Amino acid sequence: MGTAPGPAHDYDVVVVGGGSAGVAAAIAASRRGARTALIERRAYFGGVAVAGSVLMYCGFFTQGGSSPVRVVGGIGLDVLRALEEAGLNVEPHHTRSDNWVVALDQEVLKITLDRLVAREGVTPILHCGIIDASASGGVIEAVRGFDDNGGFEIGARAFVDASGNANLAWMAGASVDPLTDEARQDASLVMRMSGVAGDVSPDDLLAAITRENDGLTEPLPLPYGAVGRLPLTGDLVAIVLDLPVDALSAVDLTRAEMRGRTIARDYFAAFQRHLPAFAGARLQATGPELGVRQGRVIRTQRPSAVADVLRGGPVPDTVAVAGWPMESHQGSGPPRYERIGGPGWYGIGYGALVPEGMDNLWLAGRAIGADADAYASVRVMGTAFATGQAAGIAAAHFAIFGRHDPSAVAVELEAQDAILAL
């Protein structure tokens, strides 16, 4: 059997999941003075940005306007500054959907997050899956991880679930709301292509596949979404292939991944036949993983709601600010956008991060509580940095003082340069 990184309660805070939310949570908890471990099943931090080549940070800015208005500061902004110091241009780009995004590079992002996690005194535990949680009466005592040596326990006083699919919350016995196939957000398989000459728009890709489908007995699904250039390689990234999938099922993920790769191959062949810009191009990569948008829905004390998004502005006990519109990927056709009301931003309350019936667990990133419409906004990576920072501070405060205190969390968020209002 494997050996544990330390005895039970060797850490104050354990964060499960090393994507945007998990990195922010771990760094925030460590800055608050908590001994913190960050567990990630992959070989690197960065989550789907790296694993799925979703190389666009969405949610750092409000929608529209002649210049970007930033709604995420704190650790999210620290990451952008570190990427810039590493040679990446992090100036936001305005998209056809009237949003502002930051293009990324996988290798720069990986090494930058490694350095930030190490610099902040967080204990990184990569290649570690979580298979169980020791919990009783709403209190988690330890998680059971595994590697190729076997299983081992990692204990703490407080925990953050930034796993995306809310795996830790589910293992600990948190209440799960049902999610139908019709309500679930589709996943995307990203295509990265080199050697594409000149400007290419989503309309160009749609026209190519429309032409390709003429006469086909089994037409390809039409591509809708976004395209963009990566900042160092100049590769073209196309996020235009959506697939319905149950992200909790290995069988369904296998089906969707294999089908997606086949469609991507056929897409690229059609692009080369019908678009001169692709004459000398190469399909560098797909994914390699699907960019999953939604897994479990955990019942929380006060989930973010569509009314919050449409009204805009703060909510009670605001601990994060969101600026990305409700972007829904459900069924065929292009993604559907609905703007945030009022000032163009809205608050996410402390209660959206706290699962019902759990005392020492906080949710972060796309695991937080939200109704179906609000979820289409809160799930993006920029917002995940903000909710992750809030969850990390809340967990650290609980580990140190043994209680929930949203007001104290807000004070520490401001001390860590997070944005709680505009």
Image (spheres, grey):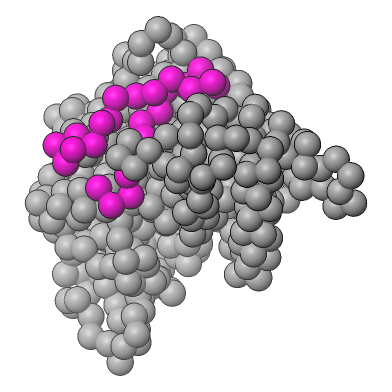
Q: Position of residue 296 (x, y in %)?
A: 56, 54
Q: Quadrant of the N terminus?
A: bottom left
Magenta part of the chain: 84-108
Quadrant hosting residue 230:
top left
Query: Where's residue 284, x and y in %?
Result: 47, 54
Q: Quadrant of residue 57?
A: top left
Tell me the quarter of the image containing the C terminus.
top left
Q: How many marks?
A: 0
Query: 52 or 395: nearer the eye?
Result: 52
User: Residue 360 placed where, x, y %?
Assistant: 33, 55
User: What residue is at 66 percent from the left and 70 percent from the top?
Assistant: 251
- 308 is higher (above) or lower (below) than 142: above
Q: Residue at x 48, y 55 (%)?
A: 285
Question: Which of the 4 image quarters holds residue 28?
Answer: top left
- Give yes or no for residue 7 being in the magenta stretch: no
Given residues 214 and 114, the one toward you in this image is: 214
Q: In the picture provided, is 297 more to the left or to the right than 141?
A: right
Magenta-span inclusion, residue 105? yes
